[in-house]
Image (cartoon, rainbow, N blue to C red):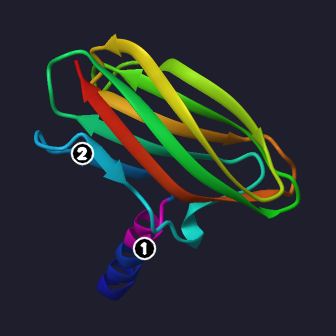
Amino acid sequence: MKKIIVILMAMSFCLFAVAQDKSYTFPNSRTYVDMSGFGTSDTIVASDTYSIVFTVNQHYPNTQSVYVDIDSVSGTPTMNIIMQGRIFAGGTWVAIDTTAWAGTGDTTFTMTNATAARYRYYRLYFKSDATAQKAKVIDVQFKLWRE
């Protein structure tokens, strides 16, 4: 019985270890991160969601830019890519910027917010709406300006 419990616990750990979503916490001294090196677990399939959460440890209004490099793996995937912010960990996400993407190759774009806000958490949210299509995140760069 103990072996079964240990095996189940190990399997559940593996399931959580391969979760798609990513996060990054900015140290007080940094305002830029390049998150290259995404793997196959970062592939966004039909009707799927994927998110990257950035935690900003500061108390001043800030603006930000996000560079995204995304590539279609199969077909012509379509998705909404949404930059969101929130003040509290349990708060509601507020849309900052949104872009729609449909691609058949490697595409890059930048989302920039020039209106300073006091968000502590930012989320780059990918929401696929295509059937049987796949896309892969190649690179995400996040730049924060503390105003």
Provide residue 26's location: percent of width, then percent of height.
21, 43
Which sits in the foreground, 7 or 139?
A: 139
Image quarter (top left, top right, bottom left or bottom right) of the N terminus = bottom left
Bounds of the magenta segment: 12-19
Provide residue 100's location: percent of width, then percent of height.
73, 33
Can residue 93 be seen here?
A: no
Which sits in the foreground, 20 or 65?
A: 65
Q: Amino acid at mark 1?
A: Cys
Image quarter (top left, top right, bottom left or bottom right) of the C terminus = top left
Q: What mark, if any, has residue 14 been given in the picture?
A: 1
Provide residue 51's location: percent of width, then percent of height.
51, 44
Q: How many marks?
A: 2
Which sits in the foreground, 2 or 126?
A: 126
Quadrant for residue 14, please give it. bottom left
Q: Main secondary structure of the magenta part?
A: helix
Earlier in the chain: of badge 2 and badge 1, it is: 1
Report helix, strand or loop for mark 2.
strand
Say which residue appears at 48% left-offset and 60% top-offset.
19
